[in-house]
Amino acid sequence: MNNKNTFLSHLASQLGRPLKTIPDSLPTPINTYPEERLTELSEEERYQYFLNTAKLAGSDYETTTQEALPQCLLALCNKYGSSVILTGDPRLKESGVIDLLSEHCDVSVWDHHVGAENIEHVKNAKVGIVFAEYGLAESGGVVLFSGADKGRSVNLIPETTLFVIKRSTILPRVAQLAEKLHQLAIKDVRMPSCINIISGPSCTSDIELIKVVGVHGSLNAIYIVIEDC
């Protein structure tokens, strides 16, 4: 912009002040509550806080081990529907989940190479399975990173979504998540195409404050927590 200073000087004059080229210093925060809330909890206390808050938000949860994860997910799929769509997350493949479910259920795996065909698979699925990156104790929510093989529809359209999450990835609140994303940016790691924080099944109270579940997404949200610590 060749006339940048002229343009900015004109704006400043209209505001009745001189042109500023250096921003004012930020005021000193009166506290560090956003960064410190819930950080005083022990790992066990934070974990229980997460589970309790998730329950209040309408989510159910199951606990399991890494080795028992495939059988745990199979039991839930048998309960909620054997038509299943999973993201192409390598952690689901490496854990044996996809192989076991493929033997007993009608399974589709999100594959960016087939494009719109993925949506057709999602529309026919009763259960969607995704691997969450983090949990947030304060809201009882889980954090999902979208990508080429992690379609957002997998946790949006099926009636039931199963969120797999490692206990060791549960953070106090969104401030700690922001710091982790900041560290990725510093290392020039490619950011996900979308970051979703999901707390419980889809619901709304827009009409006369009457809560209705499943309006914009899944009716059931179930966390499968891997006890890895």
Image: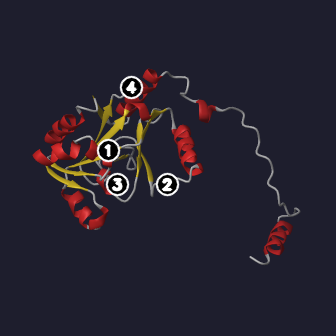
The answer to whether residue 151 is left or right of residue 158 is right
As helix, strand or loop, the secondary structure at mark 4 comes to loop
Q: Earlier in the sequence, mark 4 or mark 2?
A: 2
Which amino acid lies under the numbered mark 3 shown in the image of this protein?
Lys
Of residues 194 and 55, which is closer to you in this image?
194
**What crowding class fits label 4: few (fewer than 14 Cα within 10 Å), some (14-19), or many (20 or more)?**
few
Residue under label 4, please give it.
229
Residue under label 3, please give it.
150
Spatial CA span between label 3 and label 4: 26 Å
The answer to whether residue 128 is left or right of residue 191 is left
The answer to whether residue 18 is left or right of residue 222 is right
Q: Earlier in the sequence, mark 1 or mark 2?
A: 1
Q: Position of residue 200 (x, y in %)?
A: 35, 40
**What crowding class fits label 2: few (fewer than 14 Cα within 10 Å), some (14-19), or many (20 or more)?**
few
Rendering quarter of residue 76: top left
Q: Earlier in the sequence, mark 1 or mark 4?
A: 1
As helix, strand or loop, the secondary structure at mark 2 comes to loop
Q: Dots 3 and 2: beta carbons under 8 Å?
A: no
For residue 183, which numbered disc appears in the image? none
Nearest to the eye among marks 1 and 3: give it.
1
Q: Position of residue 215 (x, y in %)?
A: 31, 51
For residue 91, which numbered disc appears in the image? 1
Residue under label 2, please give it.
191
Q: Dots 1 and 4: beta carbons under 8 Å?
A: no
Spatial CA span between label 1 and label 2: 19 Å
Q: Earlier in the sequence, mark 3 or mark 4?
A: 3
Q: Dots 3 and 4: beta carbons under 8 Å?
A: no
Above or below residue 220? Residue 51 is above
Which amino acid lies under the numbered mark 1 shown in the image of this protein?
Arg
